[in-house]
Image: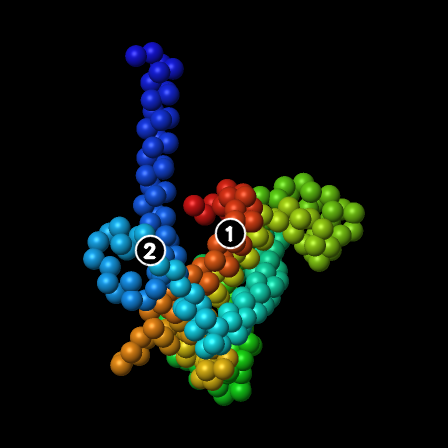
């Protein structure tokens, strides 16, 4: 077999392996879509794999009951909290990352080590003390309670710092010689060149807030202000459960970040190549 033939066979094998891997990952998503749109009685009577993956009936009862229970409001609250977290978190994270790059001292190295350690520390260890602090400040049961703890994201700071380190020092020195201060260099040099990292960090902030369950469960006691992830859990009780409504709500919950990922995937790939995160 010639070298060209071996290359074609290798490429064909890798393509087949990639397609098979894609199918394996798509099967649970397809099962979720089917479960959200099938009739509840059919879901309970499925006895084979084909019955599970290929529905015989179609129903929107899960989505109707979700709307009637106010799930759209919960999605709106989660979306508002996620957008607020992205906006505020990018401001905090980008300024912190620029500080670590522009001001390099022994103290800055120690502080950066603390930042790196912060995203290695499980949030569960801080949740209960934070609930007490927020309750004493009267910040529970509202968007500030959801947004404020998520603004200082150590992973976002790390991601942006790695990207800012890739900015050529010559450009920063040239702006300094022209009389540009830190704020001007940050706004006109580091932010434009770190655009891909900003999008990647924004996605990190969005997903971390969007998927958050423990903190909203602890800090939001008013069911009228609950988030989407907590609302899904309310479908399951000790005496009854509404699985079709839960499947419909989960489907809505994953569609929004999936759409966002679809439009930002190129920037995310560029961000991972500059930040060192794989």
Q: Secondary structure at mark 1?
A: helix
The one of 179 and 65 positioned closer to us in this rendering:
65
Query: Dot 2 corresponds to which residue?
Result: 55
In the rendered view, would you say 61 is above or below 24? below
The image's mark for residue 261 is: 1
Which circle marks residue 273 in the picture?
none
Neighbours of disc 2 within 10 Å: few (<14), some (14-19), many (20+): some
Describe residue 265's horizontal placement relative to residue 26 as left or right: right
Q: Nearer the viewer, mark 1 or mark 2?
A: 2
Query: Where does residue 175 sit, x and y in percent of width and height?
Result: 74, 47
Regarding mark 2 in the picture, which secondary structure is present there?
A: loop
The residue positioned farthest toward the front in the image shown: 57
Q: Is residue 92 visible?
A: no
Residue 189 horizontal side relative to residue 66, left or right: right
Q: Going 54% across and 67% down the picture, which residue do you hit?
A: 79
- Distance from Cα at disc 1 to Cα at disc 2: 28 Å
Q: Nearer the viewer, residue 203 or 198?
A: 203
Place of residue 36 in the rendered image (x, y in percent of width and height, measured from the top left):
38, 62
Where residue 69 sits, quadrant-wise, is bottom left
Residue at image point 62% right, 53% down? 102
């Amino acid at each position: 077999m010639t070298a060209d033939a071996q290359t074609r066979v290798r490429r064909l094998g890798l393509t087949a392996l990639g397609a098979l891997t894609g199918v394996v990952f798509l099967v649970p998503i397809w099962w979720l879509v089917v479960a959200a749109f099938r009739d509840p009685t059919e879901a309970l009577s499925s006895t084979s794999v084909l019955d599970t993956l290929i529905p015989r009936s179609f129903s929107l009862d899960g989505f109707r009951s979700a709307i009637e229970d106010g799930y759209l409001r919960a999605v709106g609250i989660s979306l508002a909290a996620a957008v607020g977290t992205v906006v505020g978190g990018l401001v905090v994270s980008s300024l912190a990352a620029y500080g670590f790059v522009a001001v390099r001292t022994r103290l800055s190295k120690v502080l950066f080590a603390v930042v790196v350690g912060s995203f290695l520390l499980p949030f569960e260890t801080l949740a209960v003390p934070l609930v007490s602090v927020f309750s004493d400040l009267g910040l529970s049961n509202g968007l500030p309670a959801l947004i404020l703890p998520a603004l200082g994201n150590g992973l976002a700071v790390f991601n942006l710092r790695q990207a800012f380190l890739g900015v050529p020092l010559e450009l920063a020195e040239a702006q300094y010689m022209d009389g540009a201060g830190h704020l001007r260099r940050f706004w006109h040099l580091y932010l434009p060149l770190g655009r891909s990292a900003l999008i990647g960090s924004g996605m990190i902030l969005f997903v971390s807030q969007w998927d958050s369950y423990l903190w909203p469960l602890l800090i939001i006691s008013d069911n009228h202000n609950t988030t989407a992830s907590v609302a899904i859990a309310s479908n399951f009780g000790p005496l009854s459960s509404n699985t079709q409504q839960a499947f419909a709500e989960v489907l809505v919950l994953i569609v929004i970040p999936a759409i966002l990922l679809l439009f930002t995937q190129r920037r995310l790939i560029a961000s991972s190549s500059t930040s060192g995160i794989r």
